[in-house]
Image (tube, rainbow, N blue to C red):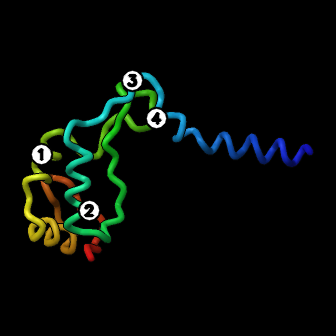
Amino acid sequence: MRRFVLSLALAVSGCESFFAANEPGKKTVEGCAEAVDHLKQCCPSFSSFLSCSYFESASNANAAPDLSPGQSRCVIKKSCDAIERAVTSGGTLCDLPMRDSHCH
């Protein structure tokens, strides 16, 4: 029984990021979800995680999003060819470093 309680406690503590989504002060970057969708439509194998959410409080681990509103608008405007070139070359796209080299 003690092992079960310990296992359960460890499992729940690992869910902090799940519960963090409902914390006060969490903000979502306007247009970011659409930009990530466009990026993944152009490069279905793109696997780098891009966060569209951040917390206003600097005490939280994710104090800044991966994409700014300007970068989000920029990515949405890019053609799939331009996105694929940036991803496969390991360059940048809208001042965002492309760390994933797979597109298809």
Percent across and percent down for residue 41 are: 23, 64
Q: Name the residue located 15 percent from the left edge and 46 percent from the top edge.
A: 71
Q: Name the residue located 8 percent from the left edge and 58 percent from the top edge.
A: 78
Q: Amino acid at mark 1?
A: Arg
For the residues labelled 4 and 1, the Cα–Cα distance comes to 24 Å
Q: Which residue is mark 2?
A: 40
Percent across and percent down for residue 70 are: 12, 41
Secondary structure under tag 1 reads helix
Q: Which residue is mark 3?
A: 25
Please give left or right for residue 18 compared with residue 32 in the image. Answer: right
Q: Which residue is mark 1?
A: 73
Q: Are marks 4 and 1 in contact (CB under 8 Å)?
A: no
Q: Is residue 3 above or below residue 90?
A: above
Q: Which residue is mark 4?
A: 21
Q: Are marks 3 and 2 in contact (CB under 8 Å)?
A: no
For the residues labelled 4 and 3, the Cα–Cα distance comes to 10 Å
For the residues labelled 4 and 2, the Cα–Cα distance comes to 23 Å
